[in-house]
Amino acid sequence: MISLPFALVGGVWLLFFLNYNISVAVVVGFIALAGLAAETGVVMLVYLDDVFKRKCQQNQIKTLTDLHQAIIEGALQRF
């Protein structure tokens, strides 16, 4: 979910650097950007949670390295 602020800040920077004015279309675009960033974050969390629960049921997460591998596996499944 940390991607939401980064997406919005990036959009504001782009508006500033391109010297665009704020309009209704720009605000609607920011609303769409926020929705897309939130949706992407939620989908990523679903994949990570699925792998984490599966690994916990199989009793495969014992160290921090195992947790790191589970995170990588979940991210690869999302990709």
Image (tube, helix red, strand yellow):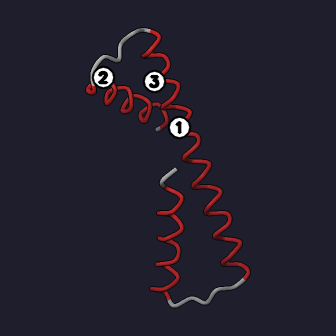
Name the residue tied to disc 1. 45
Q: Residues within 10 Å of mark 3 (few under 14, many from 20)?
A: many
Q: Residues within 10 Å of mark 1 (few under 14, many from 20)?
A: some
Instruction: Judge whether 44 appears above or below 37 on screen.
Output: above
Residue positioned 56% across, 33% down in the render: 46
Q: Is residue 29 left or right of residue 76?
A: right
Query: Marks 2 and 3: CB-CB under 8 Å?
Result: no
Instruction: Judge whether 20 appears above or below 68 on screen.
Output: below
Instruction: Judge whether 17 appears above or below 52 on screen.
Output: below
Q: Position of residue 40 (x, y in %)?
A: 57, 47
Spatial CA distance of label 3 from label 1 is 10 Å
Element type at marker 1? helix
Spatial CA distance of label 2 from label 1 is 18 Å
Name the residue tied to disc 3. 52
Q: Is residue 66 left or right of residue 20?
A: left
Name the residue tied to disc 2. 66
- Amino acid type of the residue tagged 2 in the rendering: Asp
Q: Give the mark nearest the N terminus, 2 or 3.
A: 3
Q: Toward which corner of the image does residue 73 lie, by quadrant?
A: top left
